[in-house]
Image: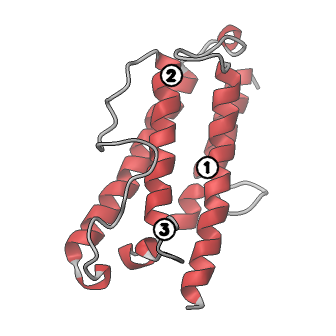
Amino acid sequence: MTAIEVLLKMIDEAFDHRSWHGTNLRGAIRGMTAATAAFRIAHDRHNIWEHVLHAAYWKYTVRRRLCGEKRGSFPLKGSNWFERPMSEKSVETDSNDETLWKADVKLLVDTHESLRAAIAALKPSELDTPAAGGETTILSLVTGIAAHDLYHAGQIQLIKRLFANQ
């Protein structure tokens, strides 16, 4: 395998391909309803839905840096963490929330695919060079985004268990 193929394998296993380590990010949210995604363990803690958008944002950020693009093209206004659901109304009875949840999951999947394409276009000789906009190498950004997916997959798994036991 080439270095680029290894990196693609890493991000795929962390996101949506089968691997030895257990549930990946996509697997952690597969089949989830908006009500489960909106469950908050405490008023000052992020819910699963917010973790999903946070992961999408950082996939976008890594892709943007790999491609040397300017900030500001993420589809949602803001950065890093995005509040969901957007109101205190009951998410269990509002079909608009279910539609928005599915759209936000699609954003995560689409952002992963665009990141994957950017990584596939890299040359191995670029991996030790700093990515646009900082001193972090391209290799560190790519391996870091795979770790980021697994970190949040684990958090989501814990939140799901807390939701099931409430």
Q: Residue at x 57, y 76 (%)?
A: 160
Q: Earlier in the sequence, mark 2 or mark 3?
A: 3
Which quarter of the figure is the N terminus placed in? top right
Q: Quadrant of residue 95?
A: bottom left
- Which amino acid is tagged 3? Asn
Kindly identify which residue carries mark 3: 47
Which corner quadrant of the image does residue 147 belong to?
top right
**95 up-or-down from 125: above or below:** below
Q: Quadrant of the C terminus?
A: bottom right
Residue closest to the eye, 49 or 114:
49
Residue nearer the viewer, 91 or 42: 42
Residue 20 on image: x %, y % = 79, 57
Amino acid at dot 2: Arg
Tag 2 residue: 65
For residue 77, say whether it is visible.
Answer: yes
Foreground disc of the pair 3, 1: 3
